[in-house]
Image (tube, grey):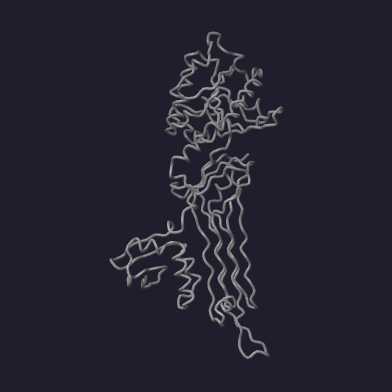
């Protein structure tokens, strides 16, 4: 069985574009040589694909640097270089991709089969045959390929189960999961029996529905401060629409209520949005319950938390498990009325606005070097300029159009650039003219 891993830092590097080549060809019937240099191939992309069968990021633990193939160089007789092969890696549904410093969300996998190109391969350079056609005259140079994208990201799994079992260690969550679903999770009687989340499917034969349920490792006091297994597993409750709060009926009533308040305090301290996630309270171990408990729903209160129902069960004797399934199904039928904690976080935190939706000009760094000099730096500009011969008037026009179309020109004007100012761009110097 693979080790459970829910956070990992990975470096992805797509392939570079192949070099275009400069070649001339002349047969015995021709007086002039003709350009015949082929274009370079595209570098390979790296694509992440969500797979509902996966529940760990352990593959990336020993593969923290992943590279796609470079494109092949062009050849003579106008032969195109081979494209680099794309690489596909599977991640669990529920994986978030953050930038290296975890300050910005790049993508959020919420459905099986969803794809995201994490880094794009470089473009192949043009050979002199292509350039000659574009310029309508023989060209004696070619373009290099552009560099493939490179990113260091953090993959952060937050499991996508609709329902989660929560409670202190040894209250019987794993046993409940086993008897209610097809799970075969191990059971023990020590503080951290469950060292990773277990998943199972509840099948409802009448409605033909199936619900994914997770059993999270026991939360303990000060878990939100990373004590014990800490908030490493608290985060996996963030995508749930319903929490099944399991308490141990073999304990005295006072202890049961204390444990109940402790768990909810940890949830609320970790993220106050948990107060809006409905809970069903499950009093387990009714087969060995103390006679003086006499618990009811009104005994369970904490702040403004929502408690839908209270039920006593026994996972050993299968007592009331059918009734519990009915309660779960009814609760989830109303889930459009409320949001998960993850949805609340994404809605209210600007960190979770995907950066791949940002406009081009936001990806470019502007710096005023002196009163009449400006520096623009961006891999986006560098890759574009690599494809141009700036001694050619036509290519200078292409650069001007690129700056206009990406709104860089407007940005520079708003910053106060004037006629005659110097602009440093991709290690080259230009004089600005409006």
Residue furthest to the top in view is 292
Residue 364 percent coordinates (x, y): 42, 60
Q: Which quadrant, please, contains the C terminus?
A: bottom left
Q: Where, by quadrant of the figure, is residue 132 drawn?
A: bottom right
| Residue occupying the point 30% across, 68% down | 372
Q: Which picture quadrant has residue 121?
A: bottom right
Q: Which residue is drawn at 44% across and 45% down?
A: 351
Nearest the camera: 255 or 77? 77
The N terminus lies in which quarter of the figure?
A: top right
Instruction: Choose between 397 and 162: the one closer to the eye.
Output: 397
Residue shown at 64% from the left, 23% from the top = 326
Residue in the picture at 46% in, 32% down: 273
Regarding residue 170, the answer to whether it shows in the image is no
Position of residue 290 measured from the top left corner of the image (x, y, whole percent): 55, 11
Give residue 148's position: percent from left, percent from top: 53, 62
| 41 sits to left or right of 100 | right
């Amino acid at each position: 069985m693979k080790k459970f891993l829910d956070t990992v830092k990975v470096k992805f590097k797509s392939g570079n574009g192949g070099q275009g080549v400069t070649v001339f060809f002349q047969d015995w019937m021709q007086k002039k040589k003709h350009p015949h240099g082929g274009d370079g191939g595209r570098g390979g992309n790296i694509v992440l694909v969500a797979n509902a069968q996966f529940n760990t990021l352990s593959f990336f633990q020993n593969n923290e640097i992943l590279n796609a193939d470079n494109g092949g160089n062009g050849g003579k007789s106008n032969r195109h270089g081979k494209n680099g092969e794309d690489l596909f890696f599977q991640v669990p549904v529920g994986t978030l991709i953050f930038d290296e410093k975890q300050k910005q969300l790049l993508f959020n996998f919420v459905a099986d089969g969803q794809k995201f190109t994490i880094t794009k391969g470089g473009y192949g350079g043009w050979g002199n045959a292509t350039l000659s056609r574009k310029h309508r005259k023989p060209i004696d140079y070619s373009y290099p390929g552009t560099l493939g994208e490179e990113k260091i990201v953090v993959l952060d799994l937050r499991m996508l189960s609709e329902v989660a079992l929560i409670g202190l260690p040894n209250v019987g969550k794993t046993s409940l999961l086993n008897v209610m679903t097809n799970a075969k999770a191990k059971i023990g009687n020590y503080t951290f029996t469950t060292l990773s989340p277990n998943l199972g499917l509840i099948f409802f034969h009448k409605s033909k529905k199936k619900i994914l349920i997770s059993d999270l490792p026991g939360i303990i006091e000060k878990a939100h401060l990373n004590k014990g297994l800490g908030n490493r597993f608290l985060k996996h409750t963030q995508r749930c629409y319903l929490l099944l709060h399991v308490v141990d009926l073999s304990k005295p009533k006072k202890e049961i209520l204390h444990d109940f308040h402790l768990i909810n305090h940890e949830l609320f301290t970790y993220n106050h949005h948990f107060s809006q996630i409905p809970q069903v309270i499950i009093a387990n171990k009714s087969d060995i319950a103390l006679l003086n408990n006499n618990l009811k729903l009104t005994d369970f209160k904490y702040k403004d938390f929502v408690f839908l129902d209270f039920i006593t069960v026994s996972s050993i004797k299968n007592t009331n498990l059918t009734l519990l399934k009915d309660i779960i199904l009814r609760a989830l039928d109303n889930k459009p009325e409320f949001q998960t904690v993850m949805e609340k976080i994404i809605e209210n935190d600007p960190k979770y606005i995907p950066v791949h939706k940002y406009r081009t000009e936001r990806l470019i760094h502007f710096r005023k070097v002196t009163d009449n000099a400006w520096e623009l730096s961006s891999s986006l500009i560098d890759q574009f300029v690599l494809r141009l011969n700036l001694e050619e008037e036509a290519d200078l026009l292409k650069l001007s159009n690129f700056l206009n179309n990406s709104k860089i020109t407007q940005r520079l004007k708003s910053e106060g650039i004037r006629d005659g100012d110097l602009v440093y761009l991709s290690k080259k110097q230009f004089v600005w003219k409006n």
